[in-house]
Image: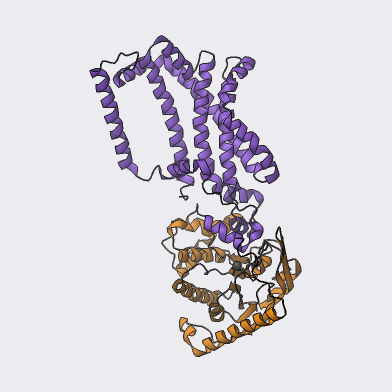
Chain colours: A purple, B orange
């Protein structure tokens, strides 16, 4: 990729402005590598991962019992599972609530982030103006805004959805921008030479070219959104998994507490698997 | 005689931050239907610039250029371009890459099935339809890009050092393949290369460009008999023609240097 860009800038330097060879994008390079290779080892990897889990969980179970650790400090894995099953009916609405705020906020944030990225990269001047604000949004934990939002919008789901969107959107946007900036001019020229429209070029060249980086944004943005959703639940109101975490810890019901953490982790893992699927299906050409 | 590529006094000056670069000056060329011409010149002399000018994607700054009777400028489907790199889309399988132009043009792919299959057969890519580009060798990728260009049955083919990135052995093979395709289809081809041997082997006529600014120093008609088997490159006639052209290029460079016209590669360190 880089070679090609370099070659190109030698041969047709007029294109150099756009043909930035940004690699896989700095800090998130590792992430995109992991996404790209997540499925390459198949069942052997799965067996290994499950094996490790069994060993670790088993050891924890034995150690906690042998050392007689009190349940309000650290419950045994079996106690956690039992508690989760017993309380699942009362936890379930909270799970749905958090899932809803996450999905709604994430879909809104990611969609706006992607659209902004696609459009903004077409106008380098505006891009340079907007980028600092995006970085500001990323570096400011949006969770800090939740009390303010709740004050104005009440302890409803809306301030949480907004917070999730504000946490995930800019993350998706900044990574997607790196992707959309990758204008591979010979490929665009190829399309244009057959009379492709701007929209066709976007759909068939720019977007697929950007997709690996968009996926990095989707993954990191999703995890950011999850953190924000759970955190927002803790701030106020009486719904959501974050609320359950505060509730159970204040009562010292640590088995249920850890059970809720498992549910949060499951959501996180689903985000990971979802993005990996997208990546495998449409962006497996990288790496 | 039906002139399909008609370039008259074309020139191109690039304006960049580092100043103006006159890449081409007063280049003229006429290519009749079914002709195979080659354009040779040293690296950086303006060959790619010339070809991009012909595609209309990077217009000339002076002179006129017509393809199939029309002023170049608009994208057109009866002109195929083959780039210096194979330029396949890495997220598409080989067959989907070949269908790319058809897709853009809104054509019904199934109507081209037979044609595409025949082309794949010709270049020896049958059985690789579902491979991703990164699973193909450089030669196979470039063959695929030839099939992609030919699939829409263009009248004119513009090729920019298509085999430049390949090893010498594969390159000779590809040259022979290209000739056999041309023998069958009689497309009009303008082929850019910096290898004089390749130009002489392939073309009816060789245009020699001087170093920047590229002017058309000389044109050589190659009357080696056709068809030309690969052994052609071993014949005495072939060597003689190549030697003549090389001699004339070095004479030209000397002449330019004396008259102070010759611009050294100022930017070579910048890239
Ligand atoms: N956009 C540009 N801005 C400034 N100078 C340019 C630009 N594009 C090309 N040039 C200059 O024009 C000259 C001709 O470039 P061109 O790419 O056409 O050469 P070439 O003959 O195709 O070389 P090669 O054999 O290496 O492919 C070069 O000296 C190059 O530096
Ligand atoms: Mg070139």
Give the vertical position of A65 relative to A134 (above or below).
above
Name the residue nearer the viewer: B80 or A112: A112
In the displayed structure image, the side of residue B203 where residue B257 appears, left or right: right
Dividing the picture into quarters, in which one does residue A12 lie? bottom right
Look at 46% across and 48% down and name the residue there: A284
Confirm whether residue B2 shows in the render: no
Look at 29% across and 20% down and name the residue there: A78
Where does residue B255 sit, x and y in percent of width and height?
68, 82
Where does residue A255 sit, x and y in percent of width and height?
35, 16
Q: Residue furthest left?
A: A66
Name the residue nearer the viewer: A192 or B99: A192
Give the vertical position of A260 relative to B219 (above or below).
above
Where does residue A92 sit, x and y in percent of width and height?
43, 18
Dividing the picture into quarters, in which one does residue B205 lie? bottom right
Look at 46% across and 40% down and name the residue there: A31
Confirm whether residue A124 shows in the render: yes
In the displayed structure image, the side of residue B151 where residue A259 appears, left or right: left
Rendered-image quarter of ligand 2: bottom right
Figure label count? 0
In the displayed structure image, the side of residue B26 where residue A54 appears, left or right: left
Dividing the picture into quarters, in which one does residue A151 lie? top right
Where does residue A140 sit, x and y in percent of width and height?
58, 28
């Amino acid at each position: 990729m880089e070679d090609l860009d370099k070659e190109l800038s030698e041969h047709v330097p007029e294109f150099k402005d756009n043909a930035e060879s940004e690699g896989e994008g700095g800090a998130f390079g590792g992430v995109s590598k992991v996404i790209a290779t997540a499925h390459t080892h198949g069942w052997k990897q799965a067996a290994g991962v499950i094996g490790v889990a069994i060993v670790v969980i088993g050891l924890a179970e034995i150690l906690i019992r042998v050392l007689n650790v009190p349940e309000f400090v650290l419950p045994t894995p079996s106690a956690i599972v039992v508690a989760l099953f017993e309380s699942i009916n009362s936890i379930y609405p909270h799970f749905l609530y958090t899932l809803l705020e996450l999905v709604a906020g994430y879909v809104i944030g990611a969609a706006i982030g992607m659209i902004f990225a696609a459009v903004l990269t077409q106008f380098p001047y505006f891009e340079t103006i907007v980028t600092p604000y995006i970085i500001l949004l990323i570096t400011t934990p949006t969770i800090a805004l939740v009390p303010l939002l709740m004050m104005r919008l009440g302890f409803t789901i809306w301030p949480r959805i907004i917070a999730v969107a504000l946490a995930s959107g800019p993350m998706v946007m900044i990574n997607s921008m790196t992707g959309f900036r990758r204008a591979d001019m010979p490929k665009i020229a190829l399309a244009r030479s057959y009379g492709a429209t701007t929209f066709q070029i976007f759909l068939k060249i720019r977007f697929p070219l950007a997709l690996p980086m968009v996926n990095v944004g989707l993954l990191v943005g999703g995890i950011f959104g999850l953190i924000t959703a759970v955190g927002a639940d803790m701030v106020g109101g009486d719904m959501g998994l974050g609320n359950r975490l505060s509730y159970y810890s204040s009562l010292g019901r640590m088995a249920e507490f850890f059970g809720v953490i498992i549910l949060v982790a499951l959501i996180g893992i689903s985000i990971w698997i979802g993005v990996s699927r997208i990546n495998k299906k449409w962006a497996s050409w990288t790496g | 005689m039906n002139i399909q590529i008609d370039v008259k006094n074309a020139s191109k000056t690039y304006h960049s931050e580092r100043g103006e670069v006159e890449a081409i000056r007063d280049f003229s060329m006429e290519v009749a239907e079914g002709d195979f011409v080659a354009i040779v010149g040293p690296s950086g002399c303006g060959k790619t610039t010339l070809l991009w000018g012909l595609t209309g994607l990077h217009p000339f700054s002076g002179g006129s250029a017509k393809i199939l009777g029309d002023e170049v400028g608009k994208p057109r489907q009866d002109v195929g371009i083959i780039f210096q790199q194979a330029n396949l889309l890495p997220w598409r399988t080989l067959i989907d890459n070949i269908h790319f132009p058809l897709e853009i043009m809104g054509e019904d792919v199934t109507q081209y099935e037979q044609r595409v299959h025949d082309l794949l057969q010709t270049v020896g890519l049958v059985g690789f339809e579902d491979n991703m580009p990164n699973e193909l060798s450089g030669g196979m990728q470039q063959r695929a890009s030839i099939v992609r260009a030919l699939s829409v049955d263009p009248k004119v083919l513009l090729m920019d050092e298509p085999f430049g990135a390949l090893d010498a052995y594969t390159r000779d093979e590809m040259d022979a393949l290209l000739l056999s395709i041309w023998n069958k289809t009689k497309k009009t081809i303008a082929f850019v290369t910096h290898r004089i041997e390749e130009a002489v082997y392939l073309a009816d006529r060789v245009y020699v460009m001087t170093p920047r600014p590229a002017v058309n120093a000389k044109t050589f008609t190659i009357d080696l008999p056709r068809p030309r088997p690969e052994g052609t490159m071993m014949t005495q006639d072939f060597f003689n023609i190549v030697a003549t052209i090389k001699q004339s290029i070095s004479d030209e460079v000397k002449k330019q240097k004396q008259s102070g016209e010759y611009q050294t590669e100022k930017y070579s360190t910048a890239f």
